[in-house]
Structure formats: structure tokens, C-alpha cells
Image (cartoon, coloured by chain):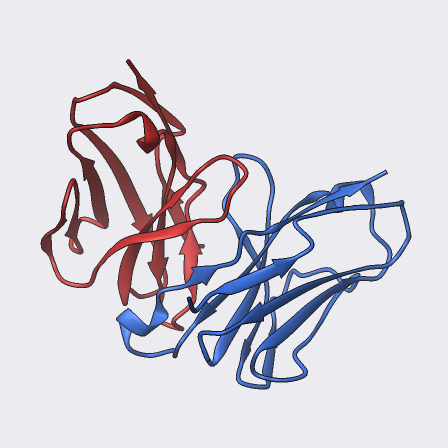
Chain colours: A red, B blue
Amino acid sequence: GQNIDQPTEMTATEGAIVQINCTYQTSGFNGLFWYQQHAGEAPTFLSYNVLDGLEEKGRFSSFLSRSKGYSYLLLKELQMKDSASYLCAVLDSNYQLIWGAGTKLIIKP
Amino acid sequence: DAMVIQNPRYQVTQFGKPVTLSCSQTLNHNVMYWYQQKSSQAPKLLFHYYDKDFNNEADTPDNFQSRRPNTSFCFLDIRSPGLGDAAMYLCATSSLRGEVAKNIQYFGAGTRLSVL
């Protein structure tokens, strides 16, 4: 079966750095996506990785290791508005997105 | 601004009373998706259209149906809602299947369905 694992919940402090991990086992791999979802709202696209390595976009970076079936999302200089769920999703061999359940990130002052 | 619009944002229906949710897009994307999402769970794909080519997920209940009359609009019909169908329903679009960047999905704000 296809499976994506993320921690259910994490807590971090405003101004700090947090790393949200994602491991996956899927039928093929065409890319990995990260989405942010605030409570009661729709997911919004953050970043994607196709090749191994780090992709940086402002305060957010995403890393991929295809051989390990592993990715992380790194958030720097945390702000209160970053409190949200972060969903990892893998594009499988059929170009279908397989979604993780998301990691709820709680930011404390 | 180009966008994905869902109506209504909140829908209350009675047990067994049919309900239709709508989605429109101005992105001119070929692919449209309907997801069901329950609290703290991953979005669950119900259907997707590649142009007019309809794809039904194997485990989508028969109670759920969809229509895409043209490129811009897509509807989700729930024929006889049960209490277990209370959820957020998300519509999304992507421009193409194949190139990874074109598989980025853009979501509407969602419709939260309550079943009484």
C-alpha cells in the first residue's frame, strides 16, 4: 500500500526554527509537495521537490532524499501566523497525489 | 485574480436530503478534483476530471456523484447524505498531468457540510 507518515503535532517558539519530517512509501515517485493549511481553510501550496537536495523559498526550505523516502520542511524565524497544519504529498507513478494527514504546528510566544 | 471558487462556504442539510456543491475556476486548468477532508485527516480524493474524462476513485461511495459541464465548472452531488458525510469538501485544479510543476494543485476555500 501507499503510506505517508508525518508527526501529528509539534510545538515551537516564535522566532525559532522547526523541522517537520515526512517519510513515504509509494508506488513510484514523481515529486513531493508541501502544503500549508490553516484551521478551517483550504491547503495552499508551499513548495515541491523532484530531485534530491534542498529547495529554499524565503523562510521555508524543503529537503528531499529519494533513496531514503524522506523529506523535511524547515521553517525559520517562526511567526505566530505560521501556526497551521503542514501536509506532505507525493506524486506517484500515475501522477496521483498521495496525501499525508498533516502535522499541526503550534507556535508559542 | 485567477482563482478557484467554491459555493457555498457552509452547507447544512438533513439526513437523506440531496445536496449539490459547486466549484468554478478561472485558471483554465484541465484537471479538476474533489476531495473530502475530515478533521485532522488527509484529504481523500473522491473524483477527478482530466478535461471531460471522468475518473472515479475505487472506494468512493455510490452516494457521491460528479458533473463537469464545461472547463470552468464542476459539481459534487451527494444523493443521500448520512451523518458520516459531514466533512470539508475541497475542490482543486491543476493545469496538466505529467510535468511535476503542472501538477501543483490550487484549492478553493472549501465547503463545510453539516448533516443534521
Q: Is residue B86 above or below residue A64?
A: above
Quarter of the figure with residue A23: top left
Q: Is residue B32 above or below residue A45?
A: below
Residue visible at 23% across and 20% down?
Answer: A14
Instruction: Specify the quadrant that holds the C terminus of chain A.
Output: top left
Q: Is residue B114 left or right of residue A16?
A: right
Q: Is residue A61 above or below residue A18?
A: below
Q: Is residue B35 left or right of residue B115?
A: left
Along the viewing direction, whichever of B102 and A14 lies nearer the viewer: A14
Q: Is residue B63 left or right of residue A82?
A: right
Q: Residue furthest left?
A: A53
Q: Position of residue B10 (x, y in %)?
A: 70, 46
Q: Position of residue A73 (x, y in %)?
A: 22, 41
Residue visible at 30% across and 55% down?
Answer: A33
Quarter of the figure with residue B1: bottom left
Residue visible at 23% across and 50% down?
Answer: A69
Q: Is residue B113 left or right of residue A46?
A: right
Q: Position of residue A86 (x, y in %)?
A: 36, 40
Q: Position of residue A35 (x, y in %)?
A: 35, 49
